[in-house]
Amino acid sequence: MIKPSPNPPDADPVSPYEPDSNKLNEAAERALDLHFPSTADIKATPRKPSTLFTVDPQATTETLVVYLVETLASVDVMVHHLVDHLDGGSRNALLGISNNIMLAEITANQVLDQIDPRA
């Protein structure tokens, strides 16, 4: 059986690297420059931190660590509620996340103990 069209087709589409396609190259460069700034441009832009969610700069270290411990404990409880509804790989992945949360909570508690040693 003979194919009606050759493979690949005889007509070669215009390549962006041909000398006749300078306009296409220039348009592509402009588009790339517009959507992807250079590293120098990114580094020259001053960093402005978001103030949407801020922590009170007057809060003590102890207050911050206590809040951290409580947040980690809450997240661990939420993860364990989700684990009860999963099987297989998803369950194992969530249990791994839970272990990392627990390690972070233990670390935060150690920091809290160093800030305010128990008698």
Image (cartoon, rainbow, N blue to C red):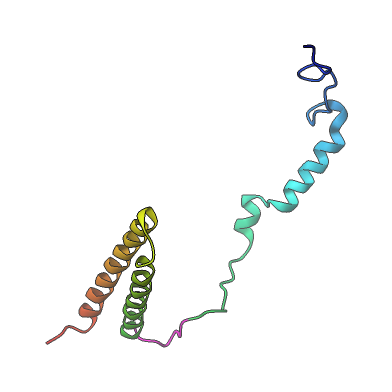
In-front residue for pair 106/89: 89
Asked if 62 appears above or below 105 in the picture, the reply is below
The residue at the point 76 percent across, 19 percent down is 8
Q: Which image quadrant is residue 102 in?
A: bottom left
Figure label count: 0
The percent position of residue 83, horizontal first and vertical second, equals 35, 66
In the rendered image, which quarter is residue 91 located in?
bottom left
Q: Is residue 107 left or right of residue 23?
A: left
User: To which quarter of the image does residue 76 belong?
Assistant: bottom left
- Which residue does the image show at 33% across and 57% down from the upper left? 92
Above-or-below relation of 37 to 51: above
Q: Is 112 displayed left or right of 55 in the figure?
A: left
Instruction: State the residue in front, 23 or 104.
Output: 104
Q: What's the magenta region?
A: 55-60
Q: Quadrant of the C terminus?
A: bottom left
Up the image or down, 51 lies above or below 18; here it is below
Q: Quadrant of the N terminus?
A: top right
Is residue 37 or residue 107 the one in the foreground? 107
Q: Residue at x 64, y 62 (%)?
A: 45
Nearest the viewer among 42 and 66 is 66
